[in-house]
Image (spheres, rainbow, N blue to C red):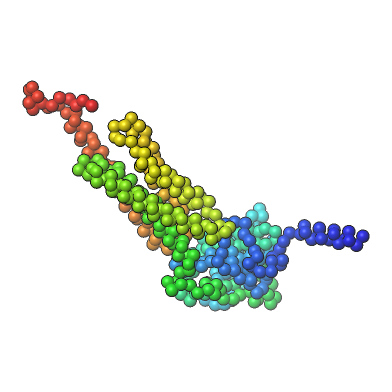
Amino acid sequence: MSSLRFSALILWLSLIPPSLSQSQTCTSQKFTTNNLYTHCLDLPTLTSYLHFSYNSTNSTLSIAFRTSSVPNGWVSWAINPKASGMAGAQALVAYKDSKASMLVKTYNISSYTIESVVQSKLDFQVWDERAEDQSGVTTIFAKIKVPADLAAKGSVNQVWQVGPSVDAKGVLTPHAMNPPNLNAKGALDLNGGQIVSTGGVDSKTKKRNIHGVLNAVSWGLLFPLGIIIARYMRTFQSADPVWFYLHIACQVSAYAIGVAGWATGIKLGSESKGITWSAHRNIGISLFAIATLQIFALFLRPKKDHKYRLYWNIYHHAVGYAILVLGIVNVFKGLDILHPEQKWKSAYIIAISILGGCAVLLEIITWIVVLKRSKKATKPYDGYNGQGREQPFHA
């Protein structure tokens, strides 16, 4: 009978959903999303944990703050730019709304009075903030632009907290004044105690930057340039066959650089278990596949007077424009993932805009040239017996 009771007890315990109290360290915790972080901390109070990554090139801090859920209550993680406590903290607060959906709101806490805890924009940029509540665990996700003075120091003051309730207007009920609540603060080393390289960038960030540069240059710039050369230089007879060799040089170089970028992406993916940027990855694989077909199709290029040359041209142009569109789209998706400094995204937008502007201008010039040639070829001239008189153009 006792063994039966023991078995029943084991079965009952197995049905209890896991909580953070059972997670002894942050390293044992997993995420159901694509989030993966370089560092994690077992925070000393309130059974809380912080997972984070810091990109020193653009001062971006990505965090996932985890703590035990508070029924009908709120949880918070904050950076205090000026002091070590709550007063002056710039807080992310998560709680459930009336429909039981998780919300993340920003609060600027100017002092210790409840009246000063109001929803407002923070003193620094925050994006991708969201929260989830699963199996008694609340997690706040966010990306934060660390202010320049704090980035220079390499550390920030963090504060975390939990509270019992939130009213209909989003006003937070004060948290308890027990020692665990009062001691929920500390310094956060942005590099996680690890030494970065002499250039101030960790090796994984370097690989991501290399991957981004290679793909932006190949798919995002050289391929469009090669297409512009092929479409518009061939209009001018004096540019033949120079345009063809320039076009081939651009596209082959772009393909070689693109393959290097694709390979670095595969390597980064293999080193980032649990992270899958599905759209970016799938477009990258598609680009590599159709660009490879495009390169090998050059060896099957029929002569100008061959009966299949028209169909080859249709195929070649369609695939080329598909590479053009997919390449530019994927560069922007990569920029959204890397979150580089705005100047780099602006530089690419300016570069691709210049190429686009040149294409529009050359399109106009091309049509003017073609129309003039057409009129000249069909225009009759006065004369006699072929002297000073050109017969109508015959194809």
Give x and y (percent) for residue 293: 42, 43
Q: Position of residue 363 (x, y in %)?
A: 28, 42
Q: Is residue 374 above or below residue 360?
A: above
Picture quadrant where residue 230 is located = top left
Residue at the spot x=84%, y=61% of the render?
9
Q: Is 394 placed left or right of 194 in the picture?
A: left
Horizontal side of residue 95 vs 351, given as left or right: right
Position of residue 360 measured from the top left corner of the image (x, y, whole percent) = 30, 45
Mark yes or no: residue 63 visible.
no
Quadrant in which the N terminus is drawn: bottom right
Residue at the image point whose x is 51% and y is 60% from the top: 127
When asked about the image quadrant of residue 68, the answer is bottom right
Task: Please say whether residue 296 is visible from this viewpoint.
Answer: yes
Out of 252 and 323, give the one closest to the viewer: 252
The location of residue 88, given as percent across then percent down, is 55, 73
| 309 vs 275: above or below | above
In which quadrant of the rendered image does the C terminus lie? top left
In the depicted view, which residue is nearer to us: 55 or 92?
A: 55
Q: Which residue in the rendered view is the most extreme toward the right? A: 1
Q: Which of the two residues, 239 or 58, is positioned nearer the viewer here?
A: 239
